[in-house]
Structure formats: C-alpha cells, structure tokens
Amino acid sequence: LEIDPTHPVARRNAYVTGLMRGEADRRDIRPLVIDAPMYAKPHLSIWGLVVAADRPLENMGVRHQGIAASLMPGNPYACHNYSLQLAEIGRKEESYRWADRATVTSPEFGAAHLDCVRRLRQVGRPGQAFAEAQYRCREFLDRAAAGKLPQNDWQAPHHAALLIAFAH
C-alpha cells in the first residue's frame, strides 16, 4: 500500500489482516468492491447481519456471494457460501445445485455433501434424497471410520448418520 495505495490485492490483504486482528468491520470492504468489482475474493466478505442491516432491501449476502461464485466457480467455498445464502431466503433448488457444484470442485468438502442431502429433503424429493444420503453420507461415514476426516469435521459423522436416518 505504501507503493500504490489503490492496489486492489494489497487493499484486500490489509482488510483481511484487520479482520483477523479485530480492527476492521465487514463493511470496510465495500469501497474495494466498488473500485474493483471483477475481483471475487472481496465479494466473499459481504454477508451476515452486519451487512444486511445496512441495506435490508438489497439482499447483499445473496448478491455478493452469487457474484463471488460466478467469478470463481472452481472455488468450493464460494459455491457453498452462495448455496447457504440461497437456502436462507428459501431458494432451496438453486441452493442444492450450488452445494453440489462445491462437492464437484472439492470432493472432500463434507459440509457441502451434507447440505446437498438436506436441500433435497427440503424440496420434497424423498427418492433422490434417499439415494444421495446413501451415497454421500455413507462415503462420509466410511472416511470417518478410517480416520481420514479433517479435524474440523468432527461433528459431521453425527450429522451424516442423522441424515441417513431421516431420509429413510
């Protein structure tokens, strides 16, 4: 930033550092999004109650997570975040498709697999939900039994087992 205070990547890095230190607010990224809308990562920061309260009619989370997912379709976190935002406003079918896209880009992304089964149950497709639960959740449980899950997925086997039970 000392060399070029308008450099978008440097500005985003300074913003992320400020967030981690507790010195920044999620709303601080908006000027960067306005100046450089073609960069996807700043859009990922625009979600949650803090942002929604400022402009409740614009549905900022869905809009910006959708932009991020469109700009980075190979990023599983962008796809899954968009899926979560869509589910929150009742667009369950689209939410399923974006969660599924997250699993295609990252097959080990357990939360997206579980969300796929949840969305199919919510849109009223019991047959497909059953088949997906058998495929996605069983694979997840097998990986857990073999000790191949990341540490941050420690709750997922319990959720996977519940989804299999609910899909029956």
Image (tube, grey):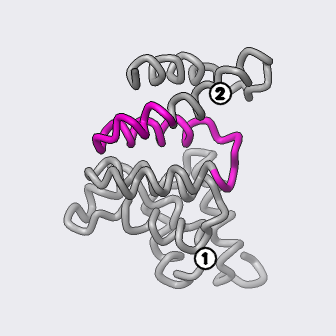
Q: Which residue is mark 1?
A: 39
Q: Which amino acid type is shown beneath numbered disc 1?
A: Tyr
> Does the magenta-highlighted stretch encompass residue 105?
yes
Q: Residues within 10 Å of mark 2 (few under 14, many from 20)?
A: many
Q: Residue 34: x, y in percent?
A: 47, 81
Numbered label attached to residue 140: 2
Image quadrant where residue 130 sits:
top left
Q: Nearer the viewer, residue 77 or 115?
A: 115
Quarter of the picture holding the N terminus:
bottom right
Residue at 72%, 24% in the rendered image: 151
Disc number lying in front (1 or 2): 2
Compared with 157, 123 (above or below) is below
SS at badge 2:
helix
Numbered range of the magenta stretch: 104-131
Q: Of marks 1 and 2, which one's residue comes earlier in the chain?
A: 1
Q: CA distance from mark 1 to mark 2?
A: 33 Å
